[in-house]
Amino acid sequence: MIHAPTTPASSLAPHAPLRRYYADERQHRSFVRDIFDQGAADYDRVEWLMAFGTGSRYRNEALRRAGLRPGMKVLDVAVGTGLVARQAVEIVGDPHLVFGIDPSAGMLAEARKNLSICAIRASAEYLPLASESFDFLSMGYALRHMSDLATTLREFHRVLKPGGVVCILEITRPQGRIATTLVRWYMRAIVPLLSRLTCRGRGSLLWEYYWDTIEACIPPQRVLEALSLAGFADVKQSVQFGIFSEYRGVKRKE
């Protein structure tokens, strides 16, 4: 487990601008929204192939490790097609206890096909939700797509009840040059190829961009610092299989 120190910061981009894809922050937001809209219909299929069908089990175990229990009220940020939310519903036992938000209309449409949760189109940086509304907040593999991580985490802290838990799942670069090279090759070449073969070319740019954001993302220690600065206590990171980071924090009780 890694514990975070505290150093002052007011804003934090998860990575430097990727000029290959967009020119500025305004284009960044629209670019990300558009590629997820384009890849939404085939997202679950590519994810299943990419993870060899093990993704749902991992997500379920990760949520349980973070402390999700039956009866908790959950906000799933960047709900996407509902991959994390489905596991949250299974754990809490009632779809009405799980709420989702996402800026992509295409992703939300896919989520609504398979889940009876309440889900709305919104940005993680500005949650249109009341303060102290949720027991648990999850975000799966979307930290890299935020515009301002510091603002996002402050919003997470605001909407959680005292004692509430934030759980952020993310893919991070493995330790070591050989491991990084292998994962880069798989994510940058094989996964986009799978997308092109199985989805008739739709959305393959999403998976090329996926690895580039992983490689450019700030290190875990910066994420931990941002969680602490947003007001979270007991901030930790655990790593599964060398690349799957689970960040956790708790909102202090008054």
Image (tube, rainbow, N blue to C red):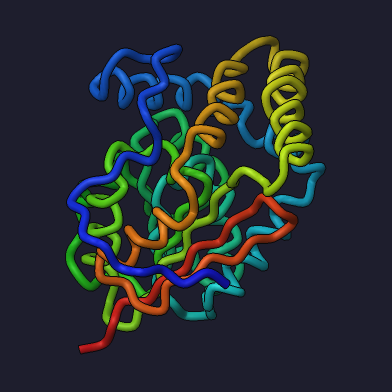
Q: Nearer the viewer, residue 78 or 29?
A: 29
The quadrant in which residue 20 appears is top left
Q: Is residue 177 above or below residue 154?
A: above
Instruction: Name the spot of residue 60 as percent of width and height, x first.
Output: 65, 64
Question: Is residue 216 rendered to the left or right of residue 251?
Answer: right
Instruction: Name the spot of residue 198 as percent of width and height, x first.
Output: 75, 19
Q: Is residue 230 above or below residue 72?
A: above
The residue located at (74%, 32%) in the rendering is: 181
The residue located at (31%, 47%) in the rendering is: 149
The quadrant in which residue 203 appears is top right
Q: Nearer the viewer, residue 128 or 192?
A: 192
**Visible residue check, residue 11:** yes
Q: Could you tell me how many numbered marks the image carries? A: 0
- Furthest-bottom residue in view? 254
Instruction: Name the spot of residue 124 as percent of width and height, x first.
Output: 30, 47
Question: Is residue 93 rendered to the left or right of residue 188?
Answer: left
Please identify the quadrant where the N terminus is shown.
bottom right
The quadrant in which residue 87 appears is bottom right
The residue located at (67%, 46%) in the rendering is: 174
- Furthest-right residue in view? 52
Instruction: Name the spot of residue 172 as percent of width and height, x first.
Output: 59, 46
**Visible residue check, residue 112:** no
The residue located at (44%, 39%) in the rendering is: 144
Please identify the quadrant where the C terminus is shown.
bottom left
Q: Is residue 252 above or below residue 144?
A: below
